[in-house]
Image: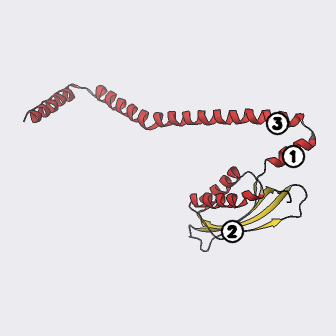
Amino acid sequence: MAIQLSVTRIRANIMTWARHLTWPWLAAFVLLAACIGFYLSVVIPEKNSLIELKQHLETMQQGEAGLKVASQDMARSSPEGQLQAFYDKFPSESAVPDTLDKMIKLAQKKGLSPKQASYRIIKNNPGELLSYQITLPIKGAYPNIMTFAFELLANIPNCSLDNVGFQRQKIGDNVIEATLKMTLYIKREAAK
């Protein structure tokens, strides 16, 4: 009963204040409520996004500083040393299964259905690199396929995208069949 009386009293006080407030005061309260809503729904998430971007920028700047040091070291070394440093950036042949697995997981993460991938080794190129020509047929939505292709190139820097073919069975289909042809460059392992 005491709670009901206090609620009734609060409601009566609010009604009294509402009768005495003029339209400018009501507009001010509505504007204040809109500002609070805007701050909570837009400003705070953008602040968090800005903090994440600053952290990402710091990481990128640290990586850039490391690359500058490495490039200065390479500039001071002999051409043979520069070439060897270039080859050392590539993964070895033993990393191929892990790289293929990474490709498949990346496709599945994007909601794509990869079919049986095929690859063949091209050994006739000179130098220390081997070329793996990979054909990866996948099914999915066009934006997901394109996002997958860009993320593939970003996450696997020793991979080049040579050709992408699209096929749709019917005009209204959302699912597209795509065939990605890639070349994966791998450091040749020394003969044992």
Q: Note whether 73 is above or below 90 in the view shown.
A: above
Task: Check residue 117 in the rendering and tell me which mark sits there, or answer none.
Answer: 2
Sequence-first tag of 2 and 3: 3
**Count of residue discs:** 3
Residue that appears at 87% across and 55% down: 128
Residue that appears at 67% across and 36% down: 60
Three-letter amino acid code of the residue under disc 3: Ser
User: Furthest residue to the right?
Assistant: 79
Task: Check residue 71 in the rendering and tell me which mark sits there, or answer none.
Answer: 3
Q: Secondary structure at mark 2?
A: loop
Distance CA(mark 2)–CA(mark 1)? 31 Å
User: Furthest residue to the front?
Assistant: 192
Name the side, left or right, on which 106 lies relative to 35. Answer: right
Name the side, left or right, on which 146 lies relative to 79. Answer: left
Q: Nearer the viewer, residue 152 or 17?
A: 152
Q: Note whether 139 is above or below 46 in the view shown.
A: below
Task: Check residue 84 in the rendering and tell me which mark sits there, or answer none.
Answer: 1
In which quadrant of the rendered image does the N terminus lie? top left
